[in-house]
């Protein structure tokens, strides 16, 4: 190809030189005469020559891009000499001729392994292709051949960096143990000697070292962990083993337990190096534990270390920031040590633990000149009246005996003197009652008008509203002698909220969860606030004739009727049908919201949309 191109280039250059000489020898021809002739050719002589060369090169075919097929390349049996093939090369359905259209060269084509051959285009062809093939001692039947081509038998051979044992017929022995010198080796499913790998036979695992020998009576590290193989080579599992004075545990998988607990009647901690921990603290990420001299984890026990007492919970973890019950109550600090002779606040209140760590209960305690009372549950009494078996005392928010003061509980008002004592069965002069106040045998104030009262003509408030004895459920009263109007209203509304989500059931007025209707809800809420809507009662309401108790409550002249614009929280809202007959009742919450029982369930909703609003009744003046 190169010779052909050079020949064409030579002709082109000769033509140009010859043309120049003709013009030079013609004396009558001037430069001005020559120039127009050159322009008329409309081509650069050098460019034209280059086009000729390029066209010639484009005629070559690249075997790398063509549709080529090479026949005759195959894996070969080792012979000790060079392996070569009679090839057939077909390009675009044309059979190419060796040494004319292509040449062949070989690499690594003598010894067993991977060999290659290179096909290079020549003449009218360019490009290069490479093919690989295997040279092996193994024939297609699986028998091993020596350098002279003969079949080798009953010996070890090395092939592909692996060792094989040939039987009497030249085949590689497979899936079997073989004795080699003083050790055992294993031949795998392909006949290769197993190295650095586990083998399972007869339901036991065996480790083969890098040299192919079976490991025995030693530790084995397989990359995933440490294992112990016994004298017979089998891997130990689910057992303890003692080596060089240290105990180790082999998990069911056969791996050495490390940084983990092992359960074997008791719990044992295995360290990072796999050794059994003993006589020390262990932190497993969840908490601190103590393992004894035999390695077992201590639990449900006290332990004294470096002069401090600790408690190990039933789980074995050190008790921290918590109470421990052991006949008395003991508080364990953040570091696990027993607290002693100090105040403790556990989030529920203040307690005092004595010098031996016990929590003080049901006793007076004097600290820095101040008396405190520790209740039977151990907590400091605060904002409450206590009885120490002799006298009543009121303790303020700091737990100290309070100054002279009126106090109030669920039963009423009482008085505490300057010593914090509760006064009983005597008169007390105080502005609260605008003069002298009588305190009964329990210490409660007995005023001339004992309860908060509505005007005489309205329904009256009582801490015992169920004066009309009933055989069905009535909500307990939640107000007392000194409750204000707003406290009565909130008692009624809060009781109604206790029924939120309960099902709507006609003619019912039961406990929360049992279901009730609109008038049943109002009756139960009224009882909680000291109101009896008699003659409407839960008992009577069970009779179908009294399904609409809301109409009876509407008729009560002991309830104040107020204008719609004057409605207030705690008022009753009545609804009517198209004929003006009352059919529904709700408790007003304010902000145009009511709580009521309506077909479906008890709910809070808008005051509108439940029928025509009949009117508003006020329960508390």
Image (cartoon, rainbow, N blue to C red):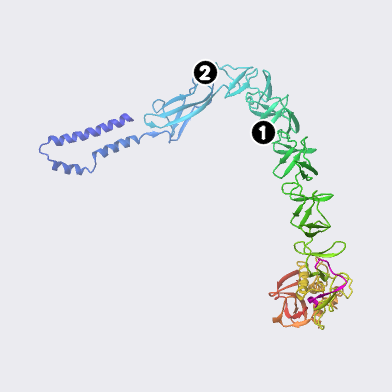
Q: Secondary structure at mark 2?
A: loop
Please name the residue that numbered disc 2 is placed on: 80
Residue at image coords 75%, 54% = 344
Instruction: Give 283 or 80, whichever is nearer the viewer.
Output: 283
For marks 2 and 1, give the CA distance.
Answer: 45 Å
Left or right of 587? Residue 467 is right
Left or right of 533? Residue 347 is left
Where is residue 620? Give x, y as percent.
Answer: 77, 78
Left or right of 24? Residue 562 is right
Q: Secondary structure at mark 1?
A: loop
Which region of the structure is painted magenta? 418-433
Where is residue 402? Give x, y as percent.
Answer: 78, 66
Packing grade of label 2 (10 A; few <14, some 14-19, many >=20) is some
Where is residue 222? Give x, y as percent.
Answer: 65, 31
Query: Is residue 309 visible from the viewing direction of this image?
Result: yes
Find the residue positioned furthest to the front: 369
């Amino acid at each position: 190809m190169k010779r052909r191109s050079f020949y064409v280039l030579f002709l082109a250059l000769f033509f140009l030189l010859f043309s120049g000489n003709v013009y030079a020898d013609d004396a009558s021809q001037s430069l001005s005469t020559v120039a127009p002739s050159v322009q008329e050719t409309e081509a650069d002589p050098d460019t034209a020559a280059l086009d000729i060369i390029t066209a010639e090169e484009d005629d070559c075919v690249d075997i790398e891009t063509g549709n080529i097929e090479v026949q005759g390349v195959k894996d070969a049996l080792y012979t000790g000499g060079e392996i070569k093939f009679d090839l057939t090369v077909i390009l675009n359905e044309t059979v190419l001729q060796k040494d004319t259209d292509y040449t062949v060269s070989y690499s690594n084509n003598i010894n067993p392994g991977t060999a290659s051959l290179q096909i290079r285009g020549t003449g009218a062809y360019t490009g290069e292709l490479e093919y690989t093939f295997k040279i092996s001692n193994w024939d297609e039947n699986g028998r091993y051949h020596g350098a002279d081509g003969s079949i080798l038998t009953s010996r070890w051979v090395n092939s592909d960096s692996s060792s094989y044992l040939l039987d009497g017929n030249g085949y590689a022995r497979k899936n079997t143990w073989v004795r080699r010198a003083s050790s055992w080796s294993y031949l795998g499913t392909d006949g290769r000697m197993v190295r650095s790998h586990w083998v399972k036979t007869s339901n036991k695992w065996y480790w083969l070292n890098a040299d192919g020998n079976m490991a025995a009576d030693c530790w084995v590290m397989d990359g995933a962990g440490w294992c112990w193989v016994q004298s017979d080579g089998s891997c130990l599992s689910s057992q303890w083993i003692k080596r060089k004075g240290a105990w180790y545990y082999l998990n069911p998988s056969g791996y050495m337990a490390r940084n983990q607990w092992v359960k074997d009647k008791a719990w044992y901690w295995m360290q990072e190096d796999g050794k059994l921990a003993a006589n020390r603290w262990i932190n497993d990420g969840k908490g601190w534990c103590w393992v004894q001299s035999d390695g077992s984890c201590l639990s449900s026990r006290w332990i004294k270390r470096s002069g401090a007492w600790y408690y190990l919970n039933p789980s074995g973890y050190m008790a921290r920031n918590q109470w421990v019950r052991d006949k008395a109550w003991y508080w364990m600090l953040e570091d696990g040590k027993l607290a002693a002779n100090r105040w403790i606040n556990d989030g529920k209140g203040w307690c005092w633990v004595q010098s031996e760590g016990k929590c003080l209960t049901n006793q007076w305690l004097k600290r820095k000149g101040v008396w405190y009372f520790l209740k039977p549950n151990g907590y400091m009494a605060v904002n409450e009246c206590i009885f120490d078996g002799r006298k009543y005392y009121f303790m303020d928010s700091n737990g100290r005996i309070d100054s002279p003061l009126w106090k109030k509980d669920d039963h009423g008002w009482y008085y505490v003197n300057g010593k914090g004592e509760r006064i009983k069965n005597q008169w007390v002069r105080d502005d609260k009652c605008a003069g002298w106040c009588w305190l009964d045998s329990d210490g409660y104030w007995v005023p001339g008008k004992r309860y908060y009262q509505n005007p005489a003509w309205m329904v009256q408030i009582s801490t015992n509203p169920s004066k009309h004895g009933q055989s069905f459920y009535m909500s307990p009263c939640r107000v007392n002698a000194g409750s204000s109007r707003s406290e009565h209203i909130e008692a009624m509304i809060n009781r109604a909220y206790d029924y939120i989500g309960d099902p709507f059931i006609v003619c019912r007025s039961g406990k929360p969860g049992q279901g009730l209707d609109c008038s049943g809800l109002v009756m139960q809420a009224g009882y909680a606030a000291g109101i009896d809507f008699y003659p409407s009662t839960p008992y009577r309401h069970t009779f179908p004739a009294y399904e609409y108790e809301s109409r009876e409550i509407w008729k009560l002249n002991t309830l104040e009727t107020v204008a719609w614009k004057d409605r207030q929280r705690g008022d009753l809202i009545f609804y009517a049908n198209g004929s003006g007959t009352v059919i529904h009742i709700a408790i007003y919450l304010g902000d145009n919201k009511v709580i009521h029982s309506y077909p479906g369930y008890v709910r809070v909703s808008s005051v509108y949309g439940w029928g025509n609003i009949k009117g508003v009744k006020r329960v508390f003046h």
